[in-house]
Amino acid sequence: MAVVDLDTLVKKADQLRHKAKVDQAIAAYLEVARVAGDELPTKGYALHMAGVSAKQSVVDKNSPYYRDAFGYFVQAEGIFKQLNDAVNLGNLYRDMAIIADYADDFSRAPGFFQKSLDALSHTEAYANQAITYDKLGLHHYLRGDYHSALQFIDKGLSLFQRDPTRAGFWRATTLYDKARVLFKLNRLDEAVSLGREALSWFEADHEGETYQRRLAQLHGFLAVTLSELSALKQAKEHYQKYQRLLKSFDHAAQAVIRQELEELTR
């Protein structure tokens, strides 16, 4: 199969992932992995992203998506080790930590975060390091340690300054994560400001790339936060957009996003 066809398959799979079409995305990435054959960088990416797609539907340790995601991650790990690809190994270990947090398997996550930082520390991939610090901060957020969470997330934001050309998606995601922590600290005006800044990035034109899942998360977040500030008209507008986006996602992926929003207000 021609390379251009493989590129098309990858783009299709990426779009399905961003739309939280979890089962379709997994199938699409596995097809990419099959077609890629001996083209190991693409095969490794596809298996990694199959696991990231499965992560979107993980609600607890008993989820079959949790088991399946680790299966894909382990296959990708073998490829990245064979390629001696420290950056992609660092990214992979970060996603293994994140999915453990999704599954409330908190004791498993710190080791993977450390492996991610160890792999990335020998590279100049500062944006990759930044998002690992962000997600380590989110790990502390989920454990109720909001001050530690803020310290790690701010360290991530400072690292983005060293790699601004690659900061876009990840920095916008980090702003959203920081906004969630600020909500817990009752710094609601700051939380809204960061949430809106993140939303503006995801709403912008990105040459055909769309980020419906992240948009749903942000509209839900802003709906709740603005409601707390008694800005009820604005809150209603964001909530309606949140609901419209959510309806297009797989049911398990919807449950994960709803759970995330419920966690915010506990």
Image (cartoon, rainbow, N blue to C red):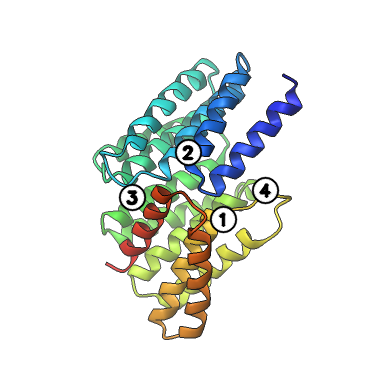
**Mark 1 touching mark 4, by CB under 8 A?**
no
**Mark 2 / mark 3, whichever is N-terminal:** 2
Q: Is residue 234 above or below residue 79?
A: below
Residue 58: percent from left, percent from top: 35, 43
Q: Secondary structure at mark 1?
A: helix
Gap in Å between the C-alphas at discs 2 and 3?
A: 26 Å
- Pick the residue in front: 37 or 133: 37
For marks 2 and 1 on the same chain, the one whose residue lies earlier in the sequence: 2
Residue under pointer 3: 139
Q: Position of residue 207 (x, y in %)?
A: 74, 50
Alpha carbon separation for disc pair 1 and 4 = 23 Å
Q: Is residue 34 left or right of residue 91?
A: right
Q: Of tags 3 and 4, which is closer to the observer? A: 3
Depth check: give the residue in front, 170 or 104. 104
Label 2 secondary element: helix
Q: Nearer the viewer, residue 27 or 75?
A: 27
Q: Amino acid at mark 1?
A: Gln
- Which residue is found at the position 49% from the left and 55% from the top? 174
Placement of the N terminus among the 4 image quadrants: top right
The amino acid marked with disc number 2 is Asp
Q: Nearer the viewer, mark 2 or mark 1?
A: 2
Q: CA distance from mark 4 to mark 2?
A: 32 Å
Which numbered circle lies on residue 212? 1
Q: Name the residue located 37 percent from the left edge and 41 percent from the top edge.
A: 99
Residues packed near mark 4 inside 10 Å, few (<14), some (14 to 19) or many (20 plus)? few
User: Which badge, 3 or 1, comes first in the chain's sequence?
Assistant: 3
Nearest to the observer: residue 249 or residue 91: 249
Count of numbered tags: 4
**CB contact under 8 Å: marks 3 and 1:** no
Amino acid identity at mark 3: His
